[in-house]
Image (tube, coloured by chain):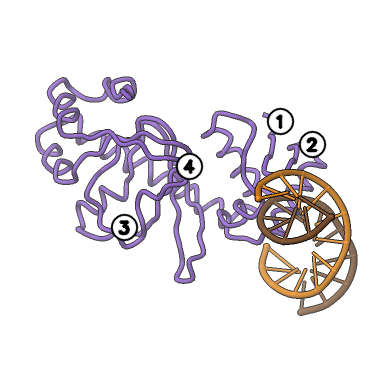
Chain colours: A purple, B brown, C orange
DNA sequence: ACATTAAGTGATT
DNA sequence: AATCACTTAATGT
C-alpha cells in the first residue's frame, strides 16, 4: 500500500516540510465503520486524510447521535487542532464512513511546525476556517431545514462521498445519523420515491435527479 | 420451512 | 415529527 500523499498535499507545502511529514507521519488504513476518535478521548495524532471519508458526530448523554458533517481527502480534523491548543478532550466522535487511508501526525508537531513553516500555518488556519463554515452549515441545516430537506441533503452528501448515486444503508441507520426515528425516515423516503427523486430497495437507495 | 431483520402503514399524540 | 402496534417483504440458516 503506497497511497499518494503528494497528490493531495504536495502543492501546499514546501519541500522541507513535505519530507518532515513523510518521515514523522505514519500511514494508517481504517476499514469502513471503524471508530477513529471517541468523545472524551485525548488525541495524540492529527490525521491527514489521503483517501476515503470520515463522518463527524455529536452525541448526547443517552448515546443518541447526530451527524454534523463529513470530511474527505485533503481535509484534516479541526478537533485535533483545538485539542492541541487547549489540551482538552475530544468533543466529537469520528467514524470511518468508507475505507479510509490516513497519515497520522503526532500532535506535538502541529505546534512546532506552526512556528517554523509558513505554509503549515496557513494550512492549519485554512482547515480551521473550512471546518467553521461546515459547522455553521450544519447548524443551518438542523435549525432551518425540515426533516425531508435534511434527509435529501444527507443522501446527497453520502452520494458525493461514495462517488456513487447508490447508497447502502438501512432506514434505521439513516434515522440514527439524523437523530430521528426509523418510521419517519421510511415515510419521507417513500414520499421522495413518489416524487421520483430516489428509488428504494432493501438496504439500498438510488438517487435519481443528480 | 422457519426465524430474523428491514420496511410499510394506520392511528394517536 | 414521534411513538405504538401491527403487517408485509426480503433474506439468512
Q: Pointer 1 indicates a residue of which chain?
A: A
Q: Which mark is residue A90?
A: 3
Depicted A89 relative to depicted A150: above or below: below
Callout 3: SS? loop
Q: Chain of mark 3?
A: A
Marks 2 and 4, how far apart in space? 27 Å
Spatial CA distance of label 3 from label 2 is 41 Å
Q: Which residue is mark 1?
A: A209
- Helix, strand or loop status at disc 2: loop
Q: Quadrant of residue A205?
A: top right
- Disc 3 vs disc 2: Cβ atoms closer than 8 Å? no
Q: Chain of mark 2?
A: A
The location of residue A35, given as percent across then percent down, is 40, 50
Kindly report which numbered mark, 3 or 4, lies closer to the viewer in this rendering.
4
The percent coordinates of residue A128 (x first, y second) are 31, 43
Q: CA distance from mark 1 to mark 3?
A: 38 Å
**Dot 3: within a 10 Å radius of its alpha carbon, few (fewer than 14), some, or many (20 or more) residues?**
some
| Quadrant the N terminus of chain A occupies | top left
**Residue under the image location 26 percent in, 24 percent down:** A12
Of the two numbered discs 1 and 3 on the same chain, state the one appearing first in sequence: 3
Please tell me if label 1 and label 2 are on a single chain. Answer: yes
Labels 3, 4: one chain: yes
Q: Are marks 1 and 4 on the same chain?
A: yes
Label 4, secondary structure: give it: loop
Q: Nearer the viewer, residue C11 or A198?
A: C11
Drawn side of residue A25 relative to residue A5, left or right: left
In the picture of the structure, the residue carrying the numbered disc 2 is: A196
The image quarter containing residue A167 is top right
Q: Earlier in the sequence, mark 2 or mark 4?
A: 4
Q: How would you rate the neighbour count of disc 2 (Cα within 10 Å): few for under 14, some for 14-19, many for 20 or more?
A: few
Which residue is the site of mark 4?
A: A97
Amino acid at each position: 500500500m503506497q497511497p499518494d500523499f503528494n497528490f493531495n498535499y504536495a502543492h501546499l507545502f514546501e519541500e522541507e516540510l513535505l519530507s518532515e511529514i513523510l518521515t514523522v507521519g505514519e500511514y494508517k488504513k481504517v476499514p469502513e465503520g471503524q471508530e477513529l476518535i471517541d468523545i472524551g478521548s485525548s488525541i495524540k495524532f492529527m490525521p491527514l486524510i489521503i483517501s476515503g471519508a470520515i463522518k463527524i458526530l455529536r452525541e448526547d448523554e443517552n448515546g443518541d447521535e447526530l451527524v454534523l458533517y463529513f470530511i474527505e481527502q485533503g481535509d484534516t480534523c479541526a478537533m485535533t487542532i483545538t485539542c492541541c491548543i487547549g489540551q482538552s478532550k475530544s468533543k466529537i466522535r469520528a467514524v470511518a464512513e468508507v475505507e479510509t487511508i490516513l497519515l497520522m501526525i503526532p500532535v506535538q508537531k502541529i505546534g512546532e511546525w506552526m512556528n517554523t513553516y509558513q505554509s503549515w500555518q496557513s494550512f492549519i488556519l485554512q482547515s480551521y476556517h473550512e471546518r467553521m463554515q461546515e459547522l455553521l452549515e450544519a447548524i443551518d441545516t438542523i435549525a432551518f431545514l425540515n426533516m425531508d430537506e435534511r434527509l435529501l441533503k444527507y443522501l446527497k452528501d453520502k452520494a458525493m462521498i461514495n462517488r456513487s448515486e447508490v447508497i447502502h444503508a438501512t432506514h434505521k441507520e439513516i434515522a440514527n445519523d439524523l437523530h430521528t426515528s426509523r418510521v419517519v425516515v421510511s415515510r419521507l423516503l417513500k414520499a421522495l420515491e413518489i416524487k421520483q427523486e430516489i428509488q428504494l430497495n432493501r438496504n439500498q437507495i438510488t438517487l435519481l435527479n443528480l
